[in-house]
Image (cartoon, helix red, strand yellow):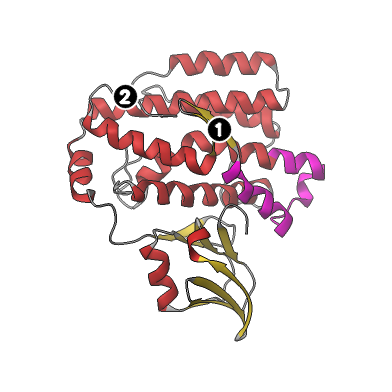
Amino acid sequence: MIGGVLELAQEGRSLGLAHGFACIYDHHTEIGRVPLDDLTAVLLTAHQITLTKPVLSALMERGIPLICCGDNYHPDGLMLPYRGYYRQTGVLKQQIALSETRRKRLWQQIVRAKIAQQEQVLAQWRGDEHIRQALRLLQQQVQSGDPHNIEAQAARLYWQTLMGTAFRRDQQEPGINACLNYGYAVVRAATARAAISVGLTPALGIHHCNESNAFALIDDLMEPYRPAVDHVVRAVVGDIGETADLMVTPAVKKRLVAVLLHDCTGPDGITPLMTAVRILASSLVAALGERNASLKL
């Protein structure tokens, strides 16, 4: 376990509760236990897993997300607590009342921050200076609501420079895409926990608004932190050398989970990513009540 993420990846394992610990069993034999208060999220990636109701209740009481991943490590479901922040109803009303103009301004901040992080990732990998300059210019061109979809224009330049011209982001594909799915699932869990801890309702997004997406706000807030995962995956690719051999092994998973400890520089100084998303979520709550408040990205 790294960064508080517990994964059940082997068939036949089960998770139970004992004296404040999440206990892992292999065919009724306990093989390990983790303090519940140390957990950030629980990932279910194996097909055959058993969980007891008491451990589910304990996870929800502590606001610990439970994520069920599909075959390619893309999340199929996310379980969050029914009860949350003491001002949850008040925050919900503010989310509902948020004007379209304000939503667009907030999304502009998020997109600009994401592109800035993409440029920084390319700088770490000595990406083409012309491409990096293009990203910096695109960042400045993001308008309220990003009506010209600058985010997508930046993504095309970014992925081709970072992963090669043949790479295409496809959630169903193995290799690099599977690794990205896993890393994003980890960041999504940390972001979800941060959002519910301050009373935000995940279904009410700032930009994402698909009616079938119950976690639209989570997908909004995690956008600036995706490049941290991209950076780790690029490092894994560099170590392996041949992308055809890239698999989501336990060693790769450890590196991806450790992204939660990645240092982020923001208005409050340098903090781990898992703390940065909490600061962002809190700043969004403040922005809901203050017309000119900015997100802490």
Q: Secondary structure at mark 1?
A: strand
Q: Give x and y (percent) for residue 70.
A: 54, 62
Mark before the other along the chain sequence, 1 or 2: 2
Work out which residue is located at the far bottom of the displayed protein and give it. Answer: 28
To which residue does mark 2 refer?
105
In the rendered view, would you say 107 is above or below 194? above
- Secondary-structure class at tag 2: helix
Q: Amino acid at mark 2?
A: Arg
Camera-nearest residue between 253 and 294: 294
Residue located 34% across and 25% down the image: 294
The image quadrant that residue 231 belongs to is top right
Q: Is residue 125 left or right of residue 142?
A: right
The residue positioned 61% from the left and 51% from the top of the image is: 257
Residue 2 location, x and y as percent? 62, 54
Quadrant where the N terminus is found in the figure: bottom right
Neighbourhood count class around disc 1 (C-alpha, 10 Å): few under 14, some 14–19, many 20 upward: some
Is residue 279 on the magenta stretch?
Answer: no
Q: Residue at x 37, y 28 (%)?
A: 295
Which residue lies under the disc numbered 1? Answer: 264
Q: Is residue 254 visible?
A: yes
3D distance between C-alphas at marks 1 and 2: 23 Å
- Look at the magenta stretch and give its main secondary structure: helix
The residue nearer to you, when weighing 42 against 150, is 42
